[in-house]
Amino acid sequence: MRIIVWALIIWLCGFAYSLVFLLWIRILIYLCAAYCLGLHPLSALDEAWLLDSKVNKCQPVCYVTFDKNDAKAIRNAILERLVGNCVRLRCCITRFLGHNFMKELPREEIEKCLEILDENEHHLHTEKDLGDFLSKTINDPIPLSTPQWRMWLYENYSETQSALLFKEHHVMADGLGILEIILLIVDEFKPEAIIDFRPTSWLKQMFLYLISPLFIFYYLIPILCKRRDRSSITNVPLSGERQFAIGKRFSLEDMKRSSRDLGVSMNDLAAGALSRGLAEYLADQKDIDHSKTLTAMVPVNLRTKKVRKPSDVKLQNNFTLVLLDFKMGQTLEDEIKRVNRLMKKAKSSIKPLTTMFIQQLIIRFLPLFITKPLMDYTAGKCTLAFSNVPGFKEDLTVLGSRANELLFFTPCMSKIGVGVSMVSHVDYFKMGISADTNVVKDPYLLLDKIEKNIQKCINLELHSDETFSLP
């Protein structure tokens, strides 16, 4: 029996490494062919985002408000700085040898992507107006034959401010990629202004790539066998119409102080408040279960280095998604500390990189009619997407106009209808919620629950919490 077990283990390892070998051979062949034709390759993770649905586009959006300036002058400055510095911003998507590539376009095609909004047709004067505009555009498809981003300028957002609205398809870049785009736009390229993140060392990534095939089945089987979430906001048929809720400002110093007092990261504190707020929201919907857990998709950064100069900005999807379970019956303090333990474990394990490796194999080797249902099946086990994007540590300017406000809205995928985004920027912390109208009727109700729990953390009123009792 022992011989059979060892033979099976050796066969599985050999099978996994043969897939890796075939993957690299295939990549080398089409990269050589693409180079001869002047095409730019997409990673398997880039291509995965093209498998989105018509009612749930994988399109991150954001807005920035800044001191009022002439919209035409801002537009010209943005075009010059973006077009000259980053290839991906000049490219459309084209298909070659069964894979998608990026192909450069002439400048006149790129200029169409940055529009000055007609102020007689659009009336954007509050944050809610900005959110409503973006919510109406988030599911509008971006044709593959055009650059995979759009920008809009609104000169008279208020008496003293203008606004920039932006969306991209996830095939182009992740959340940190959007920050790099903003760095290209501003007057002085300041990579040190991005709030610090810890890059994964190149040596560690190479080591994990080599050993990760051994763990494919170890990690893949639990994901496939994971129980689906059961709640009133999980796996609801999506309408394709989204609503955005924009939160209030919290002092970044208050958030940091609370995190230090609890001995956790600010991300853990925010995730715990989200979990507790979600439980309270579901309780109001008469949907509460002491033992229930709901799963969030959380991105984990896998970059090996930070950008230092404009030529370093390549734009990429260099992260993976880990599944984080929220317990509905926990007190706020217990949930924050539980999330802290889970995230520490996830960041120190090889699981994130192995998960990314599995995604690459699936995208590269399996046909579309298998890949798409498999991704939908995995996403169907989750209730929401959660992202805490680092903003900038200092104020940035565009043609001398200081950026005042910045907020992202995280995209969802497959049947996931709720996305919660949080951003830390200069001296404030802020939240945004994107929700399909069939899933959450009024996202401000959910936002209010989460923000009240954040305020409890700031006030250190954690012990006044009581767990829910079953009705």
Image (cartoon, helix red, strand yellow):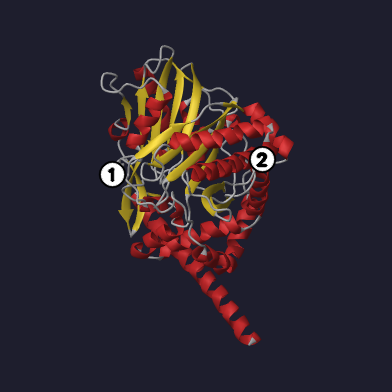
**Dot 2 corresponds to which residue?**
265
Label 2 amino acid?
Ser
The residue carrying pointer 1 sits among few (fewer than 14), some (14 to 19) or many (20 or more) residues within 10 Å by Cα, namely: some
What amino acid is labelled 1 in the image? Answer: Ser
Of residue 367 and residue 163, the one placed in the foreground of this image is 163
Q: Secondary structure at mark 1?
A: loop
| Disc 2 secondary structure class | loop
Question: Toward which corner of the image does residue 453 lie, by quadrant?
Answer: top right
Q: CA distance from mark 1 to mark 2?
A: 42 Å
Q: Is 238 on the left or on the right of 201, as rendered?
A: left
Compared to 57, does 203 lie above or below?
Answer: below
**In front: 450, or 132?**
450
Question: Which callout, 1 or 2, points at the residue further toward the start of the chain?
Answer: 1
The spot of residue 250 in percent (x, y) is 58, 27
Q: Is residue 159 visible?
A: yes
5 vs 392: above or below: below
Residue position marked by numbered label 1 in the rendering: 145
Label 1 vs label 2, nearer the camera? 2
At horizontal 52% and vertical 48% (from top left) the residue drawn is 318
Q: Is residue 161 left or right of residue 139?
A: right
How busy is the neighbourhood of tag 2: few (under 14 within 10 Å), some, or many (20 plus)? some
Q: Is residue 445 left or right of residue 269?
A: left
